[in-house]
Amino acid sequence: MLSFECDYNVGAHPALLARLAETNLIPAVGYGFDEFSDSAKAKIRAACADPAADVWFAVGGTQVNLLAISSMLRPFEGVVSAVTGHINGHEAGAIEYTGHKVLTLPHHDGKLRADELAAYLEGFFADKEGAPHMVQPGMVYITHPTEYGTLYTKKELAEIRAVCGRFSLPLYLDGARLGYARACPSSDVTLPDLAALTDAFTIGGTKCGALIGEALVFPRGKSPAAFFTQMKQRGAVLAKGRAVGVQFDALFTDGLYERIAAGAIEKAEKLRAAFLRLGYRLHIDAPTNQIFVVVSNERMEALAQSVRFTWWEKADEGHSVIRFVTSWATTDEIADELISLLESHGQAV
Amino acid sequence: MLSFECDYNVGAHPALLARLAETNLIPAVGYGFDEFSDSAKAKIRAACADPAADVWFAVGGTQVNLLAISSMLRPFEGVVSAVTGHINGHEAGAIEYTGHKVLTLPHHDGKLRADELAAYLEGFFADKEGAPHMVQPGMVYITHPTEYGTLYTKKELAEIRAVCGRFSLPLYLDGARLGYARACPSSDVTLPDLAALTDAFTIGGTKCGALIGEALVFPRGKSPAAFFTQMKQRGAVLAKGRAVGVQFDALFTDGLYERIAAGAIEKAEKLRAAFLRLGYRLHIDAPTNQIFVVVSNERMEALAQSVRFTWWEKADEGHSVIRFVTSWATTDEIADELISLLESHGQAV
Amino acid sequence: MLSFECDYNVGAHPALLARLAETNLIPAVGYGFDEFSDSAKAKIRAACADPAADVWFAVGGTQVNLLAISSMLRPFEGVVSAVTGHINGHEAGAIEYTGHKVLTLPHHDGKLRADELAAYLEGFFADKEGAPHMVQPGMVYITHPTEYGTLYTKKELAEIRAVCGRFSLPLYLDGARLGYARACPSSDVTLPDLAALTDAFTIGGTKCGALIGEALVFPRGKSPAAFFTQMKQRGAVLAKGRAVGVQFDALFTDGLYERIAAGAIEKAEKLRAAFLRLGYRLHIDAPTNQIFVVVSNERMEALAQSVRFTWWEKADEGHSVIRFVTSWATTDEIADELISLLESHGQAV
Amino acid sequence: MLSFECDYNVGAHPALLARLAETNLIPAVGYGFDEFSDSAKAKIRAACADPAADVWFAVGGTQVNLLAISSMLRPFEGVVSAVTGHINGHEAGAIEYTGHKVLTLPHHDGKLRADELAAYLEGFFADKEGAPHMVQPGMVYITHPTEYGTLYTKKELAEIRAVCGRFSLPLYLDGARLGYARACPSSDVTLPDLAALTDAFTIGGTKCGALIGEALVFPRGKSPAAFFTQMKQRGAVLAKGRAVGVQFDALFTDGLYERIAAGAIEKAEKLRAAFLRLGYRLHIDAPTNQIFVVVSNERMEALAQSVRFTWWEKADEGHSVIRFVTSWATTDEIADELISLLESHGQAV
């Protein structure tokens, strides 16, 4: 059975495991203040070209999102997100559990649009009488890549940033799959761009080669007050913080993070080409490691005999959108096997 | 420099790292529903002699405490704890952040006493007029080993259980260092006892050989409603749940968990004997892997040149209580080095 | 200046003030357990034909909504509401502050539709894999009258009730303006119907003749556990609970509640007829005490010189929707003054 | 039956009811922005000699405490209180429900001591390693009068203020019974003193002559951000804010607030003298309107046939502490009746 259902179905990139083994018996202080974490943070700061950046490590995506958002908002504020934002639908109400509303705007292939954001904020703050009875927008949340695998251009990010600036709202970018964004040849957004254009962003590890771990960057050293204590309070401090630090240290050594993501993008491109060649329609034209394909329900069932993928949504009565995902662990052999399998089923119907 | 400051200053027991490496590239489903986690859970259920037990994995101690407590309490309830309970002082208000008060009772070398618990609960529920204006005790929290390294006897646990039963309150036992309790020759409390006498308990991994991870057991299959979703909501679900599952699978294979803890207890006994032989006074007579010693402030400073320990509290103007901790990673060589060091300083002053 | 901007711009119906004065110096126990509150509760139970109903008093609408919802939901659940529901937009995130998400569905003139509710719930619970990662729908919230002044028919309520029953979800009805619903000749929904068809509902006092106060009814005695303590915990218990109890006792004596609401409905009908006669278009055809009228922006400004109303929303470039509200305090003289004023401006433009 | 069990067992001072009736039909804007509330706020600012003070009205004591505390703390902070503080024991966990821990210090007849506060804060902030794992003290809470009816002197308040200043912590004073403090001839603490020495304080209405209502003062205009929205979010905004505003306007007209409290103090003095004359022991020597008397259990039961009082705590096997409370509504006749009753029982036993 082939596995293309997600980018977190195997363990860590072998270089990370090796590094964990090498450092295993070296005593180190706890709670993330160890030398391995320090080294990883220094490398991330360098990669971001932001020597003053604060870097923290958390274990997972929902955790890092709730940490960032609940510590950046004041009690009466909510976070603005596209309706498709991961925090809005797929994190079990983690943000609301910390007391904050997710304020939704329409999405465009998973992306917020700067003009719509501006119109919403202008309307809200213009309503002097009504606004005090409502949740005040307190920050903006975007994902890159989005839930649909799409990417913001640097220009789009700069426009959103400008709107945030006009209303003094911090911008937070969820980069759970950031490696795959960085590795896209068509993307012009770099880590230094993110450090310049956001107030906080994450560099996803779990989906990009780590066993566990996400890095949370506050550019220019602007961590929320007592952030370590806030992490502890949400159960997010590891006694052995090194467990994540060592992995990020390896990921940011010799460009490993981007190199392994680039492999995943290559395989995704190859698969995308195969789908198109076989007459399938792509539901969304996205350049990263997720491929959303429209298939007939019969074909979907036939494929499911030999390959794992994710059902995404209904396309029409007879068709579904299904998702195939590549990762750093997808070899050429595995990708070719999937292509052969697809070819054996013939043209799309 | 010798390291005796805590039991989480190195990585994982090598057998766990080896198992992570072996299973690394086997595709598995996410979120803790993988085969490795399933296997670990089965082994834990067997060790607890409770085939119906629910077992969940979290990454750390504060996280697992807030998960268990916030999901077992109703909104108007608090958790009863000894004033020294870890949740009361050292978890940054994690319990209160979920909306619940910690209701404190006096401690006796870190332990709650069943008669004092009973007296408190009788008084509370007898006050028909006042009680509705107060936080209702909704569960009881104890630690084993306690923060002072002491242990409950089976009889003491049964007495606390009986009090909880009279008032229909669940009993939750925090076993962050449970391995070291199990390995004490003098302790008569087994895993099946814990499964029989509590409504929830943890089996600590982080301090007992794992890189990360705690197991949370709900005996007799009594998990709180939608517990997986509650974990997700608090940011405690790992996409690669296998990261903890594989480790617990190894820990519960061939008695590794208790075996490595027994090594730590042996070294602690040896050190305890050395301290006494050299005329030091033990602050608390505790049988587990933590040794609380009274030293003169001059001696404390002298020792600090060659060994890391933890300052615990002031004993009197000229003396301090300091803590030495052994772990699965403390070898005979390291223990002997510390003893030689102590001897080189001569008798206690 | 005429005042038609809301139904809470004057104090209490004089009969309530008189009753407060009469009972003022009679000593009574605190916290809502006084004889006046008891009498009021008995009358409400009788009016609902539900001798077992639990009745509680709170001071305001947002308070009673957050009390009911946060005590009826489990931590991992959210409340389903029309997107226009008062809790979703106009209560400053009070529900989220208690940790719960508002799950929105489309509205139809302010109302939820049973078939859309059923489709959503079916979809949610059918998605066995995805649902545990999402906020679980835990109850349904509707308003009657809605934010647009519209009313559910008994048949529509029964259909929503049936859907809730299929999925074991409680139904909560926010009756902040319930008096005006009851007083509509066209409405077939009675208090006994609400007691039979909902799991909780409110009888609004503040907008229907009281100085402060809302009654919260749990039919069939099904209050959430320790509800008094939960009220106290949210700051909603009054030391002098009599302050609300006395008022509801007066409102439910000799049919005062419905009688004074009927007066408001009569005036609203008269005004509605006048608007139509003068060629204005009603934005929504609603039978209660709120009238939503489309006016040209010039006319709006002209009217604003002599009468207070509420700007509601933009209709098109040149027109706005504005709202006029009658109440128990709107006399025939005041209504006639508004009609004269409207006539003096001539036909709608 | 005589009623001395509390100071909230009758309605409002008649002057307040009269003012509610006079203003009843005057239309006014909602949510506390009405002319009556404005007038009351101006009078309170004048009484505090703080023209820039922000004044807000809430309905009850628990509500105003949770509003002030939850809006003045950051998420990772707790509030320091004497263990006897009302927020710690008698508000059903309202503070914890907003996510914050109550950090307790010993009490001295209900009061915090500046030196003990300083020692705690010094210890906390000196522990650079441990502090980040603990709840950070974020503000200080005191009551005046305290739960035992005692009062701070101006010097004591200034000392606490100085400690708060050293650690940059705001000081909040709960004045639920402030009127009775102000009316004590022996007290040297004035409203301008409170405005100068605290960062927030309340002026209790419910226990001092109002039907409902507490005033919350932020001296020097230092309200927490978006405080109105935070009130709304906790369900604390009244649509008819005038209901409290009108009452405080009357209370602060012609010195009514202090005048009616002075009457209660006179009666309390008279009763205190009678108890002492009859040989009773006072549990606490407190100058305000609460009298804590030690009585034999037999006498307690005998008295309970004719007068309502509050059982406070057990004194010894045969004796109890019981509380008698006077209020603005205690007439000379009622006080004399109680004295006669006491005399009829003879000397204390």
Image (tube, coloured by chain):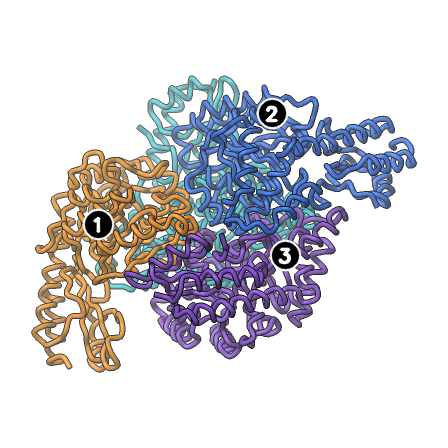
Chain colours: A orange, B cyan, C purple, D blue
Q: Nearer the viewer, residue C294 or A95?
A: C294
Location of residue B6 (image quadrant): top left
**x and y percentages locating residue C149 in the rendered image:** 47, 67
D115 relative to B326, above or below: above
Location of residue C38 (image quadrant): bottom right
Q: What SS does tag 3 mark?
A: loop
Q: Is residue C162 visible?
A: yes
Residue that label 1 marks: A160
Side of D74 relative to A261 (left or right): right
Q: Chain of mark 3?
A: C
Disc 2 + disc 3, Cβ < 8 Å: no
D15 relative to C153, above or below: above
Q: Nearer the viewer, residue A29 or D274?
A: D274
Density class for disc 1 (Cα within 10 Å; few <14, some 14-19, many ≥20) is many
- Label 2 to label 3, Cα distance in Å? 39 Å
Q: Chain of mark 1?
A: A
Q: Nearer the viewer, residue A12 or C84?
A: C84
Density class for disc 3 (Cα within 10 Å; few <14, some 14-19, many ≥20) is many
Check disc 3 and give the amino acid type: His
- Label 3 to label 1, Cα distance in Å? 52 Å
Residue that label 2 marks: D190
* Front tag of 3 and 1: 3
C204 relative to A313, above or below: above
Q: What SS does tag 1 mark?
A: helix
Q: Are marks 3 and 1 on the same chain?
A: no
**x and y percentages locating residue D208 in the rendered image:** 67, 38
Residue that label 3 marks: C13
Side of C93 relative to C182 (left or right): left
